[in-house]
């Protein structure tokens, strides 16, 4: 898969990663204590809100980061995955000085996990042709 397609498809994992981590972290509504219908409503609302935000991150902040690592020929698993975590955490680091309470840490963990999953997805999609070739050669 080309890099442009991988960069365009990678943010689509955002609502799934967010909902998964929110379920694991026992966030009210996402832990399904209120029932499946409430969870599906939250997931639908999250999807409507998260996809545009993920693409804004990807094309404005992540695009600059991608250009930087590509110019320096440093595109590898670690720069993509951990760079995505950093890109996802930039807004959190900007609001950190004015936050109060423990909610910031959960939000930082959620954004970090979503950034990690977007980076992992991007790396996987970029290398998808290599994976297909390896599996086809073994059969």
Image (tube, helix red, strand yellow):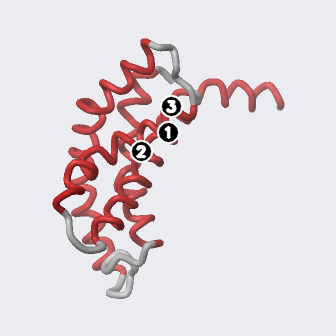
Q: Look at the picture and state if 130 lies above or below 83.
A: above
Q: Look at the picture and state if 63 lies above or below 94.
A: above
Q: CA distance from mark 3 to mark 1?
A: 6 Å
Residue appearing at x 27%, y 50% in the figure:
93
Q: Residue furthest right?
A: 138
Instruction: Indicate the quadrant containing the C terminus: top left, top right, bottom left or bottom right.
Output: top right
Residue appearing at x 44%, y 65% in the figure:
21
Do callouts 3 and 1 mark residues in contact (Cβ within 8 Å)?
Answer: yes
Residue 42 percent across, percent down from the top left: 26, 70
Residue at the disc numbered 2: 85
Instruction: Tell me the SS state at disc 1.
Output: helix
Residue at the disc numbered 1: 81
Q: Label 3 crowding class (10 Å Cα cut-off): few <14, some 14-19, many 20+?
A: some
Q: Earlier in the sequence, mark 2 or mark 3?
A: 3
Depth order, front residue of 124/80: 80
Residue 61 percent across, percent down from the top left: 27, 32
Residue appearing at x 37%, y 87% in the figure:
33
Q: CA distance from mark 2 to mark 3?
A: 10 Å
Depth order, front residue of 102/16: 102
State the image quarter where residue 127 is shown. top right
State the image quarter where residue 62 is shown. top left
Do callouts 2 and 1 mark residues in contact (Cβ within 8 Å)?
Answer: yes
Residue 91 percent across, percent down from the top left: 24, 47
Residue 78 horizontal side relative to residue 113, left or right: right
State the image quarter where residue 64 is shown. top left
Q: CA distance from mark 2 to mark 1?
A: 7 Å
Do callouts 2 and 3 mark residues in contact (Cβ within 8 Å)?
Answer: no
Q: Look at the picture and state if 120 lies above or below 5.
A: below
Residue 60 percent across, percent down from the top left: 23, 30
Instruction: Tell me the SS state at disc 2.
Output: helix
Q: Residue furthest left?
A: 98
């Amino acid at each position: 898969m080309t890099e442009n397609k991988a960069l365009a498809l990678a943010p689509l994992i955002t609502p799934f990663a967010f909902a998964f981590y929110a379920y694991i972290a026992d966030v009210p509504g996402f832990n399904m204590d209120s029932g499946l219908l409430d969870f599906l409503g939250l997931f639908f609302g999250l999807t409507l809100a998260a996809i545009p935000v993920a693409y804004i991150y990807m094309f404005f902040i992540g695009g600059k980061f991608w250009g930087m690592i590509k110019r320096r020929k440093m595109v590898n698993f670690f720069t993509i995955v951990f760079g995505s975590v950093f890109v996802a955490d930039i807004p959190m680091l900007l609001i950190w000085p004015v936050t109060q309470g423990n909610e910031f840490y959960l939000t930082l963990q959620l954004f970090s996990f979503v950034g990690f999953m977007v980076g992992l997805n991007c790396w996987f999609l970029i290398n998808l042709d290599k994976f297909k070739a390896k599996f086809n050669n073994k059969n």
